[in-house]
Image (cartoon, grey):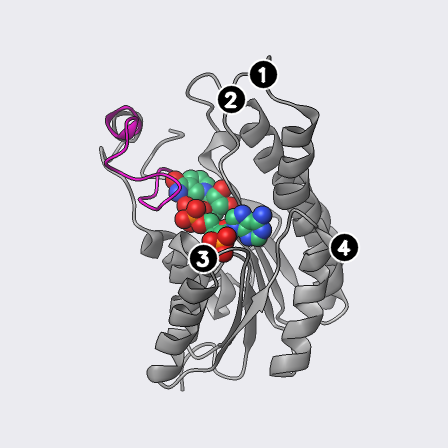
Amino acid sequence: MSELTGKVALVTGGSRGIGAAIARRLADAGAAVALTYAQSKDQAQAVADQIELEGGRAVIIHADLTDPTTAAAAVDETVKALGRLDILVNNAGFLAYGPIGETTLEDLDRVLAVDVKAIYLAAQAASRHLGEGGRIINIGSCFTGRVPGENFVLQAMAKTALIGLTKGLARELGPRGITATTVDPGPIDTDMNPADGDSGDFQRNLTALGRFGEAEDIAAAVAYLAGPGGRYITGTSLAVDGGYTV
Ligand code: NDP
């Protein structure tokens, strides 16, 4: 029997990149997985099909988190489809980028909707379903520890909100045996941040290891926190960033 056999996980933004790797990894450990997508339905379906081909169980759910109430709906849909919820991974996000003088109120609202409100509402909905041993794992960013240049005010602000959210959740849900943690990725080679992009060398040079990480590096940390090894870890952030914030 695998570590997560009998557990049900919801991974937001599981259609691509880090979220897809997390969905695959949790399924590999035995969890039934619901994964959400906004635009990339075919890619989400391909991730689910692959999991099922390997003997796991997976469903896809549409949730465009620019309407953050869809996050709570996705939690309820997961329970409806898979019977329960044990692990919530708030992963979906986009890179908000631009000088503060040029960002609009719409830009601000979008970041707060996807990166903050949706996570709060998903956690709120999950708190009604999670039992003893439950996990809420938020995907933050190394920008909470180090903002390496201009244009990242919105991104750093939104991701830093997860520190408080995680601590608050840990205190409130701890008495019920539920943990809340954040994983803060450094530069990870995905569509959002390709290792061969314009700023690739700049980012590599900011890490201690001198290279980008892979989506699977984040998935491994999430799987650890979701499994029995993570049962006494709560209210804290784990940097998986190659030493970016050292
Ligand atoms: P990708 O761009 O590769 O994937 C983003 C995922 O989020 C997709 O599944 C996408 O769904 C989903 N998503 C984007 N916008 C929305 C939305 N409005 N509503 C619902 N889902 C949405 O990004 P990564 O895998 O690189 O990033 C995953 C997480 O990791 C993000 O929270 C990001 O901030 C964080 N992170 C990533 C770093 C990196 O270097 N890659 C560094 C630090 C943090 P769809 O395709 O279906 O639209």
The quarter of the picture where residue 162 lies is: top right
Q: Which residue is mark 4?
A: 172
* Callout 2 amino acid: Gly
Image spot of residue 133 (x, y percent): 62, 71
Q: Which residue is mark 2?
A: 98
Instruction: For marks 4 and 3, give the one nearer the viewer.
Output: 3
Q: Which residue is mark 1?
A: 102
Q: Which residue is mark 3?
A: 19
| Label 2, label 1: how far apart the Cα atoms are | 7 Å
Mark 1 surroundings within 10 Å by alpha-carbon count, few (fewer than 14), some (14 through 19), many (20 or more): few
| Label 3 CB sits under 8 Å from any ligand 1 atom | yes
Q: Which structural element holds mark 2?
A: loop
| Label 4, label 3: how far apart the Cα atoms are | 26 Å
| Label 4, label 2: how far apart the Cα atoms are | 36 Å
Of labels 4 and 3, earlier in sequence is 3
Q: Are marks 2 and 1 in contact (CB under 8 Å)?
A: yes
| Label 3, label 2: how far apart the Cα atoms are | 24 Å
Q: Could you tell me which residue is drawn at 47 percent across and 23 percent down?
A: 147
| Label 3, label 1: how far apart the Cα atoms are | 30 Å
The quarter of the picture where residue 210 lies is: top left
